[in-house]
Each structure stands twice: as C-alpha cells, then as structure tokens.
Image (cartoon, coloured by chain):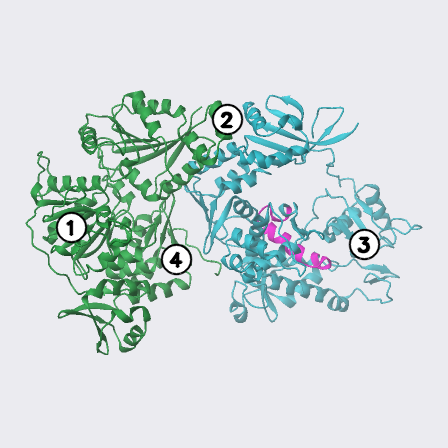
Chain colours: A cyan, B green
Amino acid sequence: MTEAVVSLLVVEDPALFDQIALAVPLVDHTLESPSPTERIVAPSFDGEIPELERRGLSVLVRNARRDPGTPTSRERPSVDQLSDPARRLLDRALRHAHEHVAIGVNVFDPDNDGPVIDELVRADLVEPLTCADDETPSRGSARFALHPDLPGPEPLDWDFAEAVMPQTDDLAGIAESPSSKATLGTGPIDLLHDVAAFAAAIHGWRPRRTLAGALTKACARKLGHRLGSVEIEATGELKADPRWGRALRALEALGALSLDAVTRELHLDLGLEDVLHGEVADVVDRLVHRLVDVDLRAVVPVVREGLASAGPDALDEVVFVDLVREQHRDLLFRPWIRKGHALYPLTGDGVIRLFDDDGFDAVEAPMIEAVLRRLHRLGIIRRAPGVFAATEDGRVWARASTTLDPPPIWISSDLEIIVPPRSVTPWERMQIERLGRCIARDVVDRFRIQRVRVRQWLTDHAIEEAIEPLRRRAQVLPATVEDTLSTWARSAERIVLFRGLVREERSTALR
Amino acid sequence: MGRAVSYVPDNPLIVQGDHSLLLETQNPNHDAARDELLGFAELVKSPEYIHTWRITALSLWNAAAAGHTAEGVLATLERWAKYPIPENIPVVVREHMSRYGTLRLLSDGSALRLEVDDAADLQELLALKPIADLLGEPIDDRGVRVHPRHRGELKQVLTHLGHPVQDLAGYADGDAIDMKLRTETPDGVPFQLRDYQIEAIDAFSSGPGAGSGVVVLPCGAGKTMVGIGAMIRTGMRTLVLCTGQTALRQWKREILRVTSLSEDDIGEFTAERKSLGPITLTTYQILTWRADRRSAPAHFPIFHQENWGLIVYDEVHLLPAPIFRETAMLQARRRLGLTATLVREDHRETDVFALVGPKRFDLPWKTLEHQGWIAQARCVEIRIPLSDPDRLRYVGAGSRSRFKIAATNPKKTALVDKLIERHRGSPTLVLGTYIDQLQWIARRFDLPLITGRTPRREREELYGGFRAGDIDVLVLSKVGNFAVDLPSASVAIQVSGSFGSRQEEAQRLGRLLRPKLGENQATFYTLVSSDTSEQEYAERRQLFLAEQGYPYRIEVEA
C-alpha cells in the first residue's frame, strides 16, 4: 500500500466550486470528489491560490494537525508494584532528570543500588542510554532515560521556619523591581510576557539573521511594527529597544527558536506552548528551571519552598543552608558507601571526599550559592549580606503572593483590547498579541484586532479558541466583537484548503 | 516605561505615558471623573466600556484659558487613576499650562502691545525668526509693539511654535442691532433656550478673552440656537458663514422662528443674491469663489466692508484654508466657531485655536442623550448575500466595479421594503450613493426622491412635506449628507455608502438625533452585501460609530 500527500479543498457552498473553476483550472488538480463540498486535490493546487486571491476568492490554508489521540500515545505507567527502595530511587531520578534523562552519578550508588536499578529496568520505567558491551545495565551506565509519562516526583518535606526573619534594613532598601545592573533589568514575569509578545510577533513568518547574528534591517522593522516599537521600526535595529533583545535571548534560552543554517531563518518551535501554558507561577517555574544549570536544578524547588515559608519576610542564608543539610543531606548527591564510609560519587579522577559536613561546605554549599546568584539575576530574589527575600515575582513563583485578583482586560466595540499589567497569563498574552496589532505599550497595553491577523490565527486554530480567553478575562465581551470575529471566521472559512493529508492509495481515508 | 506595580481597582482612569487617558465607563466613579476630564482633555473616542481621552498642548491651553490650574489637573488625575501616573505627565501638564498667559496681547492706544512676564522671555521672543517681521519696536523690557494688522498672524505663528497668546486686546464694536428672543414661535409653541445652550452662550460671552472662541456640541444639540443666542447677547451686526445653501436656509428659518427679526433683517450673500443686513448669511463656497485660479477670492471684501460686531463660523471644523487667512485679518471682531468636533481632517486645530479662539464650551453626545435632548440611536448593519449570478459577476470584475456591484445588490430592494414596513408610520430617510439604484427604489415603492439635480424649489417642498408629516419616506442621494434639518426623521436606511469621512458619518447620524416625541429613539440601518469589499468599508464605518459610543448590531439575511 502506498501513501500520497494530498490536500482537501472544502467549501461552504457547492456553488463556490463553479466560481473557483471560472478563475482557475480546478479540474486539472482534482483527484477525487468525496462530496458536493469537498475535493481532494493535488499539491499543485497551491499554485492557483494567488490567482484565486486576486479574484476575490480567498483560500484559507490549514496544515493538518496530529490528532492527540493517535496510537503513538502510551498508557501512563504504573508504579504501584515497585518496592519502596525502587520507588525512592525513581523519585530521586525524576527530581534530577532533565527532559526525561537522569545522570546516574546524581541518582544511585552503582555498587549498592544494582538490584533496584534492575527492578526499574524490568518494569520498563528506566532505560540505560549508554552501556559498555560487557557490563550489565546497572553498572557503569552514565545516563538513564525515564518513561516520559511518569508523574512528577513526590515533593520533599521541608521546614524553614527557623530561617525566617524580618527583612533587614539593607534588604528593605533594595527596590522590588529588579532594575539594577546586577540583574536582567526586568522581572521574570514581565520577561515571560515579552517572550510571549515576541513569539506572537514572529508567528507566521520567519525573520532572517545576518551572518553577524543580528536580525536583518527589514525583518527588524517588520518586527518593530508588529511589536509597536517605534524605535525598532525606525532604526531597523533590535538593540534600539533593549527589552526585545532580552526577549529574543530568552526565547533562545528556552529552546523555542531554531535557526536554519542555510536560509538563516528563525523558526518558532511548537514547544513554546509547553513552556508558556498554565498559571503564571508554573510558567515562571519552567523558565527558572530552563535557565538554571541542569546540575543545580534540584536546588530550585528547595529555594521555592523557603520563599513560600518566608512570605513577605526574609531568610537567613546561613540558617537556610544548614537546614538543607540537616533535613535532606542527599539532596544533590547520593553517597556511595565504600568500606563503611559514605563518600561523594567517585568520578574516576582519583579524588575521594567524605560525605560529611566539611564535604557539604565544600561541595553543596557553593552549589546552593550558585543557584541563589542565578535566582537573583533572574529577579526572583533580592539579596543583602547574609540574607535574601523574594521579589514580587518571586512571591508569585513561590505562591506566597498576597496580591489582589488580576484586573480584567477591557474590550471595546471598536475592536480594541486593553491589557493591564498582570491581567493575563503569558500564554493568553501570546494569543491576544496574535489577534491584533499593538498600538501602545504603556501603563496598559493596547491592541487593535485586525482581520488579517485573525485570518492568520485561523490557519492553526478555531475562532472559538480566540474568543474563549477574551470572554474569560474581559470585564465584558461586546456582542459586536464576538459577532465580528465570528463573521470574519465564517468569511475566511468559505474556502479551506487542508494541506499535508496522507492518503493511502488502497483506501479513501485521509489522515 | 516602567511597569506599574500598585493598582487601585475602584478608580476608573488609566493615565498613559503617551498622554492618552482611558476611562472605564462602567465604573461607579465614571461620571464624576468624566465631568472633571472635560475641562482639560479632549474626548478622542467613546466606544462601549472604555473611552479614550487625550491631553494635548491645545487642550491644556484651552483649560488654562478657562481658569484651570496645572495642580488642579494633576490632582484630578491622581484622584481617579488606577495606576501610578507616569513620571512625564506632571512635567508635560505643568510645562504646557504654564505657557498660557505668559504672552498677552493688550490694547495700547491705536496699536497693540505684546507683553511677557519677564525680560528674559522678551529676549527669547525677539530671537524667534518666524515672528521677526510681525513685531514692532520694544516698548520696555517686557513689552513690544504690534501693529493691529499683524494681530492674527502673530497669534497663529506663535501658537504653532508652542507659545499660545492670550488675546486681551478687546474688539471693535460693530453696528448695534435690535434683536430679541421670542418666548413663543410664530405658530404659538412656547420657546426658550435649553440650560446647556445658555451655559454655552455665557461661556462665550464672559470671562477673560470673552467674545472669541469655539462651542463644541453634538449634531442635533442645537448649535444654531447657541449662535442665535450669541448674536442677541452681543447685540451687533453679524455675519454667519454656513456650509452650503441648505444650511443657510436652515439658519434663516431658525432666526425667523425664534427671534424678533423679520425677513428684511436677514441678508443673504449667495450666488443668487448679494444682500446685506443686520444679520447676513453666506456660505464658505461663495466666499472662496474665484474667477480663475490666479485671481484672489472675489468676495472676501465682504469681511471688511461692513462694521460687523460678530462673525459666526458654522461647522468651524470645515473652515476652508483661504478663510483662515481672512480670519487672521479679523481679529478685532468677535468670532464664534460652532462645531460637533474640533478634529479636522487637515489637522489645523491649532489655527482654529489661534484665529477663532479657544474652546469655550463642550458637552459630549452621551450626556445629551441621557438628558433626553438628543435621541438614542441604534445602529444596525444588515448583511445580505449576492445572488449566484451577481457573485459570478463580482468575481470577474475589477475592484471599482466590484464595489458598485456589491453596493447595488438588487436583494437590497426587498430589504428596504421590509424595513419601511417594519417602521411604517415613522419618518424614514433612505440614503444612497448610486442614483440609478435610488431611482429604482423610488419608482418601485412610489417614493419621492431628492438628488443633486432636483430643483431647489422642489427640494424645499419635499423637505417641508417631510417635516410636516405629509411624507413618511424620503429617498435622498448624497445631497442628504449636508446640513439638512429634518428633525422628525427617526429611521435612516443607508442602501449604499461612499468612501466617506468621519464628518459625513457624523452628519448622517446627526440627521437622526433630534429629540423625538414618544420613544425618542432613532434607528440607523446600513445594508451591506456580505463577503464583498463593501463589507470591508462598512467595518471602517462601524468603527467610527463605535468610537462615538453607538453600539451596533449585525444581522444577517439569508
């Protein structure tokens, strides 16, 4: 059985095929007519779209989306049958994993945890990724792949009450909003919103980079126009507005942009939705995890827990580190027991270090300090000698914020959307920014919904997916706005071309 | 721009760094905030839920002219703001408002004196090249002589340079006239001015700089009455500049209806007649007429040959550029501008400020609607598909032809019938652009039709019949856009629209907004062929209506 890639042309009314045929040689491209309103056409039909556009017969092109319910999805694995040691080890592996891969040296003692590893491998929950030919999987394996559908690790219990203290004078004197040179110059929540805005601005086209790494002037101007940045639009230089350079770098750090080495075009990856989706606290957490070194990520939830305990107060840094050592000594490394002694994992360089308090001060304490430095730079915490506290964004991340309910957005019947600060999640911002052109970024941001942008939206979303967040967040969604969006959608969807469908030659089914 | 942190949800106002102000209409404090904003900001647009205002140099100068202070303005903003005021706003407000009043034009015998607050300001002034030829000799360290003939141009240039001039030099009195307001119209109906009309006249006639300025009132609010009231208050020979013949007739009708003047007291300076009287009505067109392109406008001398005490500029936002120049020479005369909007398509609002005068009074549409002075308007767009043969024609046509095919969709005719039937008995206007379409509708339903070719006498008869209630439905071409006073119309059906400007849209709606007996509601239908370029143009028109606060509904016909 062979497969062919075809397109499906669907019209609102059969009479439209007559109009199309009047404008272009439809019959030359038609492979089959499954119904009065459908034609299976060859990919060559794409070439007729500009002529149809010229004749007032706009074609909405949609690329086929994979149905989430395809046979490739796996059932969630069960951990109920595991022994307690196996479950603990699995939790540890999940805590240290990056993109479902855990490095063995952080997770287990190869001499003593062999049977447990074997149990996890037999249960199809872990898979060794590298293995010397003559060694069993439980030994010498540097990396393990974890089943992608495993639930998250059980959170560790922490008690940081002893470390909580009132804010010191020097800490209280540091501004909540991170605008010093020591930091990024913007908090993580605002950065995420900018990331969302930037992503929306480049959605549907591919800006090009010069060989020097900057965006081309033409692309920068177009980007500036979409972002509502007068400076960038005027100069053709992204650096004219540092905010957007930061957003671009953040998008790259999140792994959401890829560069085609040949065309030098930037592509937005679909995975951005995974980063930006959901509540703000969770989105910030994903950002933090992506921007902290892999080896240090296990510390991140600990700091988050500490900030949650502190709320509006501060934490004594020395006491905090001590509490980490006392409560979960093996947070970052599992000790290897050799000849009755607990050692740091042996790395083959001949250095043997005892897994004791001195070892903690030499190894883990600097790692915790590195995480605090990074969180300070990201705008999650403020620091003064010996003490740290959450910024406003840090409190949101730690879910220790006492802010009011988010303000509503306003939508007026002349198709303007007004977005106050912190009124929407980053993902909702991206959706709004895709629907309209930014006409002001100011105390509140203003957008004008545009038909051409809504049409672009419809290439990969239904109109209800645009209306629903507006309805949810707006004080009132004017009926005229909803009517206008629905009318534009109906008009755009009069003629739809679904591209990239696979047809099995012995069957009429399309997928 | 810093990101806002604190937030006061109960307040209705957002102050942006770009000088725009967003006012939440459903907030309980909206009315109080709006009444305060009126004094120093301009309403830019008023769709549902959020109104946009803007503070500009001009709006702040107008505020200063009306007696507001910078600290008062800032206190208002602080009082109502949801978020912290951007740092640049207090600087801008203080800077602009402090400028008004620092330059004053005063009478000094037969000449004028431009006076400043301190000597350094005078040196700065004398260094401005654009005004070098307009200034005379310095009188002392704070004043310089100005020839009266340069009064207007000097104010115009300085205002454009960001230095507004407070004109306190007074006016030459015109010939006195005896004109009184009636308490009863000739047909026995009691008459008096409305409160807001009296306030507008008071604002024009009193205070520093009184006797020059602009009154801003929506269509249908009775600006003509304000003009008449100002004439009476001034009590001097008056020249009224109208937008066209029909508007001129409307002015004449109203003057005769509500004042003690007779037909002989009203001159008409038009193409047909060149009579002058205590009140003289003329048009912008006749004043700017010239024999050929190289000649000067032939009738400008009218401005100077009579001893006018007051000049009234109706629809001052349409004041043609040549008349600005003549107005610059008329600064010794009292000047009143009347308009529904200060916004000009050519952006010469600053010239209106400098040469006609600052805004003296303003009242928004919605306030008048709530008070019942103008009708509540409903706007409905009805979308109708093209028939299959027409759709094929549309697809094969060029862009201009496509618009006409869409606009003259025959299916609209049946809809017109349906709407007329729906509103049977209500005075209805059917408006359109394409004469052949209107002729078809008029013949089909046996309706009277007025186009640009209809003789004036027949036009007046038909208008008169409509006003009197003898004619229920009147079909009008583009001529119906301009200054037609049809107070009893409560339904308008627009079968085809042109690529019109905001002013045309305002005027069309204004034709409906006179208060009506009974329900006091007006309905404005627009018929649009769906999925055509006509629909795209309709969407732009909808934006204007929404901006003015009129929600519109979309209906779809099968």
Indicate yes or no whether the magenta region holds residue A292.
yes
Please give left or right for residue A312 compared with residue A350 in the image: left
Residue topped by disc 1 = B239
Name the kind of residue labelled 3 in the image: Gly
Magenta stretch in the rendered image = A274-297
Question: Mark 4 or mark 1: which comes first in sequence?
Answer: 4
Marks 4 and 2 share the same chain: yes
Q: Position of residue A169 (x, y in %)?
A: 52, 71
Dot 3 crowding, Cα within 10 Å, few <14, some 14–19, many 20+ = many
Q: CA distance from mark 4 to mark 1?
A: 38 Å
Q: Main secondary structure of the magenta part?
A: helix
**What numbered label is drawn on residue A104?**
3
User: Of residues A196 and B541, which is closer to you in this image?
Assistant: B541
Distance from the alpha carbon under mark 4 to that under mark 3: 59 Å
Q: Nearer the viewer, mark 2 or mark 3?
A: 2
What amino acid type should be assigned to the residue bearing mark 4?
A: His
Task: Tell me the subunit letter for badge 1.
Answer: B
Which chain does the residue under circle 4 lie in?
B
> Could you tell me which secondary element the residue under label 4 belongs to?
loop
Three-letter code, disc 2: Leu
Q: Is residue B433 left or right of residue B467?
A: right
The nearer-to-camera label among 3 and 1 is 1
Identified at 53% across, 68% down, the residue is: A174
Determine whether the residue tagged by mark 3 lies in a helix, strand or loop: helix
Disc 2: which residue: B392
Disc 2/disc 3 C-alpha distance (Å): 70 Å
